[in-house]
Structures are given as C-alpha cells and as structure tokens.
Image (cartoon, helix red, strand yellow):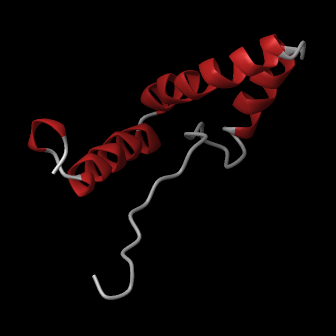
C-alpha cells in the first residue's frame, strides 16, 4: 500500500482515466501533449536543438490519424497468473 492508502493499480487506473479523457477530447489532448512537450522541450533547449521544430513535428504527428490525439498511449497489462 502506497502513501495515503493508494495502491499501484489505483494510480494506474487514474492514469488510464486521464488518458481516455485526452483520447476523446481534442482540447484535453492538446493539454496532455503540452505536458509531454514541456519535458521534451527542456531537453532540446539543454542540448542546443531547435525545440520549436521538435514541438511542431510532435503536434503534426499527433494529427496523423486525421484527428488530434494524445502523443502517449497507456494500458494496463495483467501479468500471467494475476
């Protein structure tokens, strides 16, 4: 049992819930992706890369299906025997 009584599976389910919201709502997907890009942009800046090009490319990639989607994908996979 983790802090405040949360178990790992409970946290995993909440992450999935947030991901599903982002997958269904383009406005939430945009916020979701911006959070991801904050970390990526920091690495780009620290290493002297063109962070604006990377940011632009990521958002274009998010539209590859014709709908703006989250850059990440989450799922819970049960181990055999669970």
The correct choice, above or below, for 48 with respect to 21 in the image is above
Residue 51 percent location from the top left of the image = 81, 15
Residue 33 percent location from the top left of the image = 56, 29
Residue at the (74%, 31%) spot, across then down = 58
Left or right of residue 26: residue 40: right
Q: Nearer the viewer, residue 25 or 13?
A: 13
The correct choice, above or below, for 59 with respect to 38 in the image is below
Please identify the quarter of the rendering in which residue 45 is found: top right
Q: Quadrant of the C terminus?
A: bottom left
Residue at the (39%, 78%) spot, across then down = 79
Of all residues, the one furthest to the left in this rendering is 5
Q: Nearer the viewer, residue 45 or 22?
A: 45
Residue at the (57%, 21%) spot, across then down = 34
Left or right of residue 82: residue 71: right
Q: Nearer the viewer, residue 39 or 62?
A: 39
Residue at the (31%, 88%) spot, across then down = 81
Please identify the quarter of the rendering in which residue 63 is found: top right
The correct choice, above or below, for 78 with respect to 81 in the image is above
**Total numbered circles:** 0
Left or right of residue 81: residue 40: right
């Amino acid at each position: 049992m983790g802090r405040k009584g949360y178990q790992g599976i409970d946290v995993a389910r909440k992450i999935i819930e947030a991901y599903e919201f982002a997958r269904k709502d383009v406005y939430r997907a945009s916020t979701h992706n911006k959070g991801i890009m904050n970390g990526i942009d920091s690495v780009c800046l620290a290493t002297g890369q063109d962070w604006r090009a990377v940011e632009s490319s990521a958002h274009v990639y998010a539209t590859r299906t014709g709908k703006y989607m989250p850059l990440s994908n989450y799922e819970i996979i049960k181990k055999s025997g669970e």
